[in-house]
Image: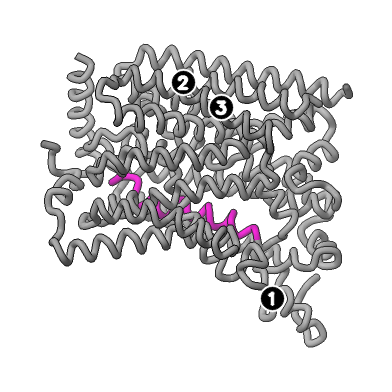
Amino acid sequence: MPGVSASNVNEMQKTGKEDIDMATWVIMLGVEAVFVIGSIIAIAVWMKRGGGEEDALDRRLAELSEMSKAREAAERN
Amino acid sequence: MNSLHTMAIVFIVAFLAFLVFIGVWAARKNARGAGAATTEYFLGGKSTPMFVLAMSYAASAVSAGSFIGDPGVLSTVGWPYYWIAIATVAGTAIPGLIIIRRMRLQSEKFGSITIADYCSQRYRSPGLKIYLSILMVICFTFTLVAQFKGAAILLEMYTGVPFKAGLVIMLVIVIFFVSSGGLRSVAWTDCFMGCFMTVMSAMLVITAISHVGGFGHMEEILAGDYPSFNQIYEYGSESEVTVTAFGIAMLFLYGVFIMFCQPYITARYIALPDIKKSSVGKFLIIAIVTAALFNLMFLVGMAGRVMFPDAEADYMTVTVSTELFPPILACIIMIGFFSAIVSTATSILLVVAQGVGGDIYGKLFKGATPKKEVLVTRVAAIVIGLIVLAFNMVEPPAFLQIFIYLGLTGVGSSMCMSLFCGVLWKKSRKEGAWASAIMGPATYLIWTQGLGLSWASGMGVAPIGAAVGMFVVSWVLNAVKGPDKELMEWADPYIDPK
C-alpha cells in the first residue's frame, strides 16, 4: 500500500503524495463524501431559513405566471 | 449469435418500444395542454412534477460520458481524473441555491423559453440569442456525435448489430421521441431511466470493486502496474498530463459554471412548477444524491483496467459488464447504459432543435407563430440527426469523452456569465454579455488548440475568460456612460413589464 516512509520518498514525489500517509482511495472518496454531505447540509440549512413556506419570491412568481398566461392567451387569439 | 446477443435484442426492442410509447403519450398530452404550443412542447406546460424534473436533471447530466467515456478516461489516467466527479457534484448544488429561484422569476417576467432566450431577453439583445443558438447548434452537434457513437458501440457489443446499422436504429428512435413529445416525454423517461440507472450503477460498481479484492487491493495492484494511477493529482506541465493541481481548481470552476449552465439542464429550472425553498431544496438534494451515485461508475473504469489490462478505454465498462455478469444481468445493465445515453442525447437534441426552431427561426421570421416554431423544431431534430449520422459514418471520434467536453465547454462558457451576472449583478451590461459569450469559448480554444494545454484545465479556464469579458466591459462602460438604468429596471422581477 502506498504510504510515506524514509525509504520511499522518491516514489512519493513521483506520485504527488509526499505529505500524505493515507491510501489514495480513502482520500478521494472521503473528499467526495465531504462535498456531497456538506452540500446536503447547506441546502437543508437554506431550506430551514425560509421555513419551507411560500415567500415573497414565490408569490411574485404566481403574479407573473398570471400575467404570462394572459399574454399567451392574447397571442393565441 | 450467442445467448447474450439474443437476449440483448429482446431487451433493447422492449426498451425502444417503451420510448416510442412515452413519445406518443407526451405528444397527445402536449396537444391537449392549456398553454401555448411552445410552452407545452419546450417546457412540458410547466406542470411536470418536481421529483420527475430532479431525476431528469440528474439523468440528463449523466450521459455516455459518465457511464462510458469518463470511466474510460479514468482507466487510462487513474485517480487524478476522479476530481471531475467530485467537482460536478459540488457544481450542481452550490449555484442552485443562489441562482435557480431568481432566474425562474426573471424568466417568467421575460417570457423566456430557453436559456439563450433568457440571456438575450435579460440584456435586450436579439442578436445575442441568434449567436448563442448558432454556437449551441455547432458545439452540441459534436456532443451528439459522441453520444451516438457510444450508443452504437453498445449495441454492437451486446447484440452484434453492426456499428452503422445500430447508429441508424438509435437515431430514428431518438428523433421520433424528441420530435413527438418535447420536454414532457424527455423528462418522464429520464425519471424512469434515472431510477434504473441508480440500481444498475450500484450493481456494477459493487461487483467490479469486489472482483478486484476491494479498494485497498486494487490500489496495491495499480501501484505495481500503473503507479501514476494512485496519484492525487498528476505531476508535469499542463501540456503533458490531464489533471494537475491547477487542473483540480479548474475542474471546480467547470462544475460550477459550465455544467450548471448547460442549456439542457437549465431547461429544468425554467420548467419548475414553483420556487418554494422547500421544493427547490428537495430538487437539488435529489439531483446531488443521484448524480453522486451515478459518478461512482467512474470507478468501474479503474477496476476494469486491473481486470482487463488490454481492453480499449471506451469499451471498458461494457467489457466489465459482459465478462462479470450472466447474460440476463448483463442485459439489465445494458439497458442502464442505454438509459444514460438516451436521456442525455434526447435532452441535447431537444435543446439544439429548439435553438433552431424557437431561437433562430422564431427570431428571424416575423410570421413565426408558436405552432410554426414547434414544427421547425421537429424538422431541425431530423436534420441534426442526419448530420450526426454523417459524422459517425465518415469518421467517428477517437476518444468519446474529449469530444463531449468540447461541446459542453463551448456552450457553457458562452452562457455562464450572462446567466450568473444576469441574476446576481443588476449593473451588468449587454456589451459585457456579448464579450463574455465570445471570450469564453475563445479562451478554451486558445488554451487547448493554440497553446496545446490540458483540455481538462481548459474547461475551468474558459469561464475565467468569460468573466474577464463581462466584468471589464461592463465596468468600463458603466464608468464612462453610467449604469444602464432602463436595463436595470427591466432585470428587476419585482417591477412589472411595460
The residue depicted at 80 percent of the width and 82 percent of the height is A8
The residue depicted at 61 percent of the width and 25 percent of the height is B171
Q: Chain of mark 1?
A: A
Q: Earlier in the sequence, mark 2 or mark 3?
A: 2
What is the spatial separation of the Cα atoms under label 3 and label 1, in whole angstroms? Answer: 47 Å
> Would residue B142 be found to the left or right of residue B33 on screen?
right
* Circle 2: element type: helix
Q: Is residue A48 visible?
A: no
Q: Nearer the viewer, mark 2 or mark 1?
A: 2
Q: Amino acid at mark 3?
A: Gly
Residue B35, above or below B193: above
> Would residue B274 be found to the left or right of residue B403 on screen?
left
User: According to the image, label 1 marks what residue?
Assistant: A17
User: According to the image, label 3 marks what residue?
Assistant: B385
- Across and down, in percent, residue B421 comes to 30, 54
Determine which of the numbered discs, if any, sits on residue B379 in the image.
Answer: 2
Q: Which region is colored magenta?
A: B81-103
Residue B91, above or below B161: below
Tell me, yes or no, whether dots 2 and 3 are on the same chain: yes
The residue depicted at 18 percent of the width and 33 percent of the height is A63
Q: Amino acid at mark 2?
A: Val
The residue depicted at 18 percent of the width and 29 percent of the height is A67
Q: Nearer the viewer, mark 3 or mark 1?
A: 3
Quarter of the view holding residue A30: bottom right
